[in-house]
Image (cartoon, rainbow, N blue to C red):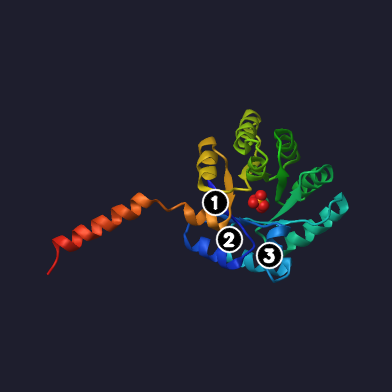
Amino acid sequence: MKFFIDTANVDEIKAAAAMGVLDGVTTNPSLAARETKPYAELLKEICGVVEGDVSAEVIATDYDGMMKDAVELAKIADNIVVKIPTILEGLKAIKSLTSDGIKTNATLIFSPSQALLVAKAGATYASPFIGRLDDISNHGMELIDNIATIYNNYAYATQILVASVRHPLHLVEAAMIGADVITMPFDVISKLIKHPLTDIGLEKFLADYRKANKG
Ligand code: G3P
C-alpha cells in the first residue's frame, strides 16, 4: 500500500519523508491556499523533496481550460500527476490526457459509478473522499469496498487512492480492503506509530535495565 501525504506544506512533507515511508503527495487548491507561496512555485519545491507522484489540481472546469491547466502543471516536474474533478468535462480531459501520456488523479469521487467511469477513461488514480461521506452519515469505507470489487471484476489498472482521511482507523480499514494508496494529513500520519502500551512497555524495560545494572 502506498502512503501519500495530503498537504501543500513543505515542512510537513519533509517531516513525513524523513519517516521513510512516504510514497507521494496530494495537494488541492484549498490546501495550497493555506500556504504563502504561489501554487506553481510550491509544486516545484514539493517535487524536489519527493520522488514519488505529486498530485496538482486544475482550476478550470471546462475541457479546453482543464487541458491547458494540465499541460502547464505537467511541465513543472516529471512526477506531477494532474488532478481533475470528476465531472463530465473532466472525464473527457482524463481520456485525452491519458492518450497524451499524462498521469491523472480523478478527484471528488463520491459514488461507484463515478469511479467506474474514470477507470474506463484511463485515470491513473481514482480518489474517493471517504471522510466527507462519513461527515454526512454515509459509510465512506463502503464506497472503497464497492470500487475495489468493481475494479477487481474487470481488472482495471486505475489505482484506488483513498482520500479525505480523518483518523488511523480509516487507514486500517482501507488496507483490509486492499486499497492501492491512501493520502493522509500530517496529523493522521503522526498518529500511526503511537500506542500507549508501547510507551509503557518501553519505560518498564528501561527501568528494569537500570535497576539490574545500577552501580
Ligand atoms: O485532497 C483531497 C482530500 O483528501 C480532502 O480531504 O479533509 O478536505 O475532506 P478533506
Quadrant where the C terminus sits is bottom left
* Residue for point 70% across, 57% down: 28
On the image, the x and y values in percent for residue 29 come to 73, 59
Work out whether 148 lies above or below 2.
Answer: above
* Residue for point 58% across, 48% down: 166
Q: How far apart are marks 1 and 3 (CA)?
A: 22 Å
**For residue 202, which quarter of the picture?**
bottom left
Mark 2 within 8 Å of ligand 1, using the beta carbon: no
Name the front one of labels 1 and 2: 1
Amino acid type assigned to the residue bearing label 1 in the image: Phe
Q: Dot 3: few (<14), some (14–19), or many (≥20) neighbours within 10 Å? A: few
Q: Earlier in the sequence, mark 2 or mark 3?
A: 3
Relative horizontal placement of residue 22, taking residue 8 as reference (left or right): left
Name the front one of labels 1 and 3: 3
The local secondary structure at tag 2 comes to: loop
On the image, the x and y values in percent for residue 26 come to 64, 55
Closer to us: 54 or 133: 133
Please report contact status of discs 1 and 3: CB closer than 8 Å, yes or no.
Answer: no
Q: Which mark is residue 35?
A: none
- Which residue lies under the disc numbered 2? 51
- Which residue lies under the disc numbered 3? 34
* Residue for point 70% across, 34% down: 112
- Which residue lies under the disc numbered 1? 3
Amino acid type assigned to the residue bearing label 3 in the image: Arg
| Count of numbered labels shown in the rendering | 3
* Residue for point 61% across, 30% down: 149
**For residue 54, which quarter of the picture?**
bottom right
Residue that sits furthest to the top in the current view: 153
Q: How far apart are marks 2 and 3 (CA)?
A: 23 Å
Q: Distance between the residues labelled 1 and 2?
A: 13 Å
